Image (cartoon, rainbow, N blue to C red):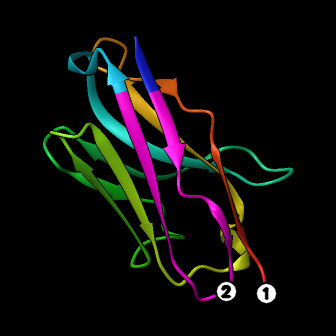
Amino acid sequence: QVQLVESGGGLVQPGGSLRLSCAASGSMFSVNAMGWYRQAPGKQRELVATITSGGSTNYADSVKGRFTISRDYAKKMVYLQMNSLNAEDTAVYYCAARGVRTARYDYWGQGTQVTVSS
């Protein structure tokens, strides 16, 4: 089992920045990628960014050039640096881990709210 705990959400003005953190624990050897997803009110959960164990990254088109995903293996942490935030980025952000055996994002955190508003 893998446990994930997000932090760092909050209220930010348009154009501002936030850094989300995800603390992982448990059987991390069974995970080969980490990701950030988000869900806005009335919308489906969507991919924001992913990073593999090899360091390859992938981003949703809507956040490319503004968001950066990174990880610290030693600390078992994953980060999402979000810059130039706008109202469309308002959502609950979830950290997720992809299982080696299933190739699916089987493990999820509880989410952290990000609100972009003036």
Count of numbered tags: 2
Looking at the image, the residue that sits furthest to the right is 42
Where does the magenta region start and end? 4-24
| Residue 118 badge | 1
The disc labelled 2 sits on which kind of residue?
A: Pro
Residue lying at 37% horizontally and 14% vertically, measured from the top left: 102
Identify the residue under disc 2.
Answer: 14
Answer few, some or many: residues within 10 Å of disc 2's Cα (few below 14, many 20 plus, some between 14 and 19): some
Q: Position of residue 67 (x, y in %)?
A: 42, 70
Q: Is residue 57 left or right of residue 79?
A: left
Q: Nearer the viewer, residue 17 or 64?
A: 17
Residue 89 found in image quarter: bottom right
Q: Residue at x 40, y 30 (%)?
A: 97
Inspect the image, locate mark 1, and give the three-letter code of the amino acid beneath it. Ser
Left or right position of 37 against 59: right
Distance of mark 2 from mark 1, alpha carbons? 6 Å
Q: In the image, is residue 53 part of the stretch drawn in magenta?
A: no
Residue 10 versus residue 51: which sits nearer the camera?
10
**Magenta stretch: residue 9 in it?**
yes
Left or right? Give the position of 75 relative to 109: left
Q: Is residue 90 above or below residue 53?
A: below
Position in image of residue 86 (x %, y %) = 66, 80
Residue 13, disc = none
Residue 60 in the image, given as x and y percentages of width and height: 48, 61
Q: Residue at x 68, y 84 (%)?
A: 13
For the C terminus, give its image quadrant: bottom right
Q: Main secondary structure of the magenta part?
A: strand
Which is more toward the observer, 15 or 62? 15
SS at mark 1 in the image: loop
Q: Please determine whether, in this image, residue 31 is positioned above or below residue 8.
A: above
Picture quarter with the N terminus: top left
Q: Residues within 10 Å of mark 1 (few under 14, many from 20)?
A: few
